[in-house]
Amino acid sequence: MIKKTMQNNKIMKKTIILAILLLIPVLNYAQVAINTDGSAPDASAILDVQSTTQGMLVPRMTASERDGILSPVNGLLVYVTDDNQFYYYDASNSEWLPFGKNDADWKVNGNDMYSMPSGKVGVGTTSPSNKFTVTGVGDIAGTTNASNGGILIEDVQDADSGYKLFLDANELQTVRDGAASDLYLNIFGGGLYINQKKFAFDGEADTNKGILYGGINGNKEPMLKFISDVNDPDGNLLVVSGGGLTVISGGEHASSAIENEVNNNGDYGCNTESVLILADEGREDDKAISMAVYLQSANWDDRKEAINIYGGGAVEIVHRYDAGPNSGDAISDLNIGPRTGKHLELDDNEIHGMDGENAAGLSLNYDGGTLTFFHNSSGTTGQVDINGGGTSYALNLPNSSTAKIGKARATSWATYSDSRLKTNVKNLDQSLQIIHQLRPVRYFQHDSKFVEQGEDKTGNTSLEILSTGTHNYGFIAQELYKVVPEAVYKPENEQLDLWSVDYQMIIPILTAAIKEQQKQIEELKKEIRKIKENK
């Protein structure tokens, strides 16, 4: 047994020596070839792996296992099974980066290249804001024939045929078959907005004069001029220019109106008004402006008048001015009538009757007729607030002892009391008991108003009690509410509204109490008579 073991040891030593001798040339050569035909590795490769039936498998692991690798070397490659992607380590940024995804990298198919990103693509930017964003100065052209670079959009890649659209700096040009062509914008509908301070055609824009005009080399011809018949001095005229809009109606005096009102201020378009519309001289009762709305397939007699403004009228429309007194030289958004006399001013949600610059009475249906508020088939309701009375009831006056502010007067006031509207009718019982619980008082009722707190008037609203007022007789609403709640209006928010009493509702209770008391008196009279008869 000992002899056999010694022999085995000798064989093992020889094997180890032989393996070392075989490895010496491999280590010296510093290259490794893995193949089945015994060929040497390529001279340029440290590792040459060849096979036609098998692939190479890199280490596979989860993302957490990948992140647990200690001090990974730059370029270390692994395959992550969480998202089935290859990752390599970028030591400069200390992060693992994936090789391109199937839906995000560029693909080559023959001579074509394409990409199908699920997100956004940026050129010259790391954070594209749209599907495709180009940042910085660039030149995009379909051919090299674009005369001034910029962007070229074409349907045929040929300089002499097809439609082309050139964009460069402040220019937009269209070409059809090598020649200039018309440019159509939104021909199938929609709006066209030009948000610049000037617009010129067939010439150069003058930044110091006008807003819209035509002409050549600064010659201020009207931008648009229409004459019904250039040979007819009485023909209709429409002029749109830097001076505004001028309309002269036809008729025997049209030519003199043009001469006097337009020519003196410039060549058919420099009138001093923003909009100048002249009716025929001497015919002020004719309509200077007439607009009508027609029903579909309607005849002339079926027209619905929309706007009629006569030559003798005075209508001013001005933007962003306050209506009413104390507005200085400004006038309202809409002014009807002469400003120096009685006229009407409208501004936002206000209507003011004015006499010059002073407030005047505003009459509605002065000569009779019906004045209707908030009446429509949809059932929408509204409130009338007089002198700041609020909106709790259909008609509201404020708590003020001043007759012209918080008081109303009429010959009589009728309330609805139709038997057809009343059900479950019962006689009043124990009315005297209710009356005994009431506390009639005499008091001084202060005037009041609700005011908004804060300098900007946007804070909470609070009740301001004034020193003015009047002596009165009645009940305290909060006390009456405990006895006859139906006769009391209790506000939902005391910061915005006051308690109030419907005194008419007390009348039936008083009437029932009088009857009940009268019955007791009659019974007492009977008792007295019996006592007298028994004496």
Image (cartoon, rainbow, N blue to C red):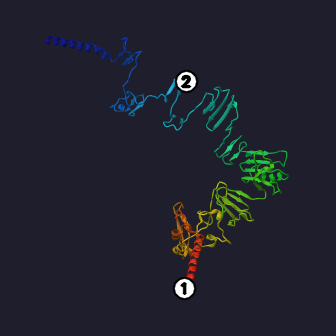
Furthest-left residue in view? Answer: 2
Residue that badge 2 annotates: 112
Quadrant of the image containing the C terminus: bottom right
Type of amino acid at the residue the image marks with label 2: Asp
Tell me if residue 213 comes above or below residue 284 in the rendering.
above
1 vs 2, front mark: 1
* Residue 444 in the figure: left or right of residue 346: left
| Residue nearer the viewer, 300 or 145 | 300
Q: In which quarter of the view is residue 346 placed?
A: bottom right
Q: Position of residue 29 (x, y in %)?
A: 32, 16
Q: Position of residue 521 (x, y in %)?
A: 57, 80
Q: Residues within 10 Å of mark 1 (few under 14, many from 20)?
A: few
Residue 450 lies, with reference to residue 141, above or below; the image says below
Disc number placed over residue 325 in the picture, else none: none
Q: Give x and y (percent) for residue 302.
A: 79, 50
Please tell me which residue is depicted at 60% across the width and 30% down the height of the picture: 141
Q: Is residue 192 left or right of residue 314?
A: left
- Residue 400 visible? The answer is no
Please indicate, yes or no, whether residue 457 appears anywhere in the rendered image: yes
**Which mark is first along the chain, 2 or 1?**
2
The quadrant holding residue 519 is bottom right
* Residue 531, numbered label: 1
The amino acid on which the numbered mark 1 sits, given as a three-letter code, is Ile
